[in-house]
Image (cartoon, rainbow, N blue to C red):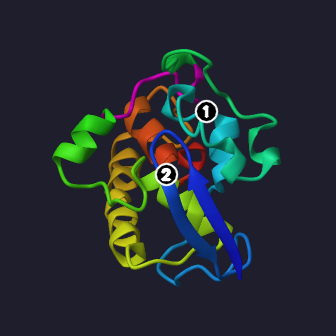
Amino acid sequence: MIDILINDSFQEYYHYQLTEPVGKNFHPDFMPGLSPEEMLKLGVFGGKYLNDCQKEFPEKWFFEAKLSAGRKDISLNYFSVDASQPLSEWRRKGWIHPQDPRGWFQWYCRYYMGRRSEDDSRQIKRWKAFRRHEGAIKKNCEKYDFRCRRKQRQALLHWAYDSRVL
């Protein structure tokens, strides 16, 4: 086991353990199509994610990541559309768990690194529910027509579904 201590603008003295190998031993119902590194490289969240907590994750995740030094930059998203709700909305809806105050992607990054927690089943359930957007794209778009439903395609990328194959 590896102990991780977090001190950033969202968490102070938060501690967790990595109990699984990186990228391995996922729950059988959780089969993401993209790793966090791949997501960051493709362009997600307008480049404004993990900006002040990169030291928590492997340096190589950020070598080709599309990150914005300033405000959110939608042109950095793979489909160049805004497919995110603000964190305040996530908080208002009760989707944020205290152990991952930045939301689902933070949970996924930590899960990918090997952390397992009491919130895993809830987050995996949310991830599975998001798949409905994949069905909408398949129903309404020609395969590989990336002009069709770009916002849904971008949102799927934010949830580790590879919408480039639809």
Q: Is residue 47 magenta?
A: no
- Which of the numbered marks, if any, corresponds to residue 166? none
Q: Quadrant of residue 131?
A: bottom left
Residue at 49% over, 33% down:
45
Q: Is residue 81 magenta?
A: yes
Taking 55 as reference, is 98 above or below it? below
Residue 25: % across, % down: 65, 83
Residue at 17% over, 44% down:
92
- Magenta residue span: 76-85
Residue at 42% over, 54% down:
104
**Is disc 1 placed on a helix, strand or loop?**
loop
Residue 127: % across, % down: 40, 63
Q: Residue furthest front?
A: 13
Residue 70: % across, % down: 56, 15
Residue bearing the label numbered 2: 12
Taking 55 as reference, is 97 above or below it? below
| Residue 32 in view (yes/no) | no
Q: CA distance from mark 2 to mark 1?
A: 28 Å
Q: Nearer the viewer, residue 47 or 51?
A: 51
Residue type of the residue flagged with mark 2: Glu
Residue at 60% over, 21% down:
68
Q: State left or right for residue 23 relative to residue 64.
A: left
Q: Nearer the viewer, residue 12 or 86?
A: 12
Taking 57 as reference, is 110 above or below it? below
| Residue 104 in view (yes/no) | yes
Residue type of the residue flagged with mark 1: Gly
Q: How many marks?
A: 2
Q: Tell me the chief SS of the magenta region.
A: loop
Residue bearing the label numbered 1: 43
Figure quadrant of the N terminus: bottom right
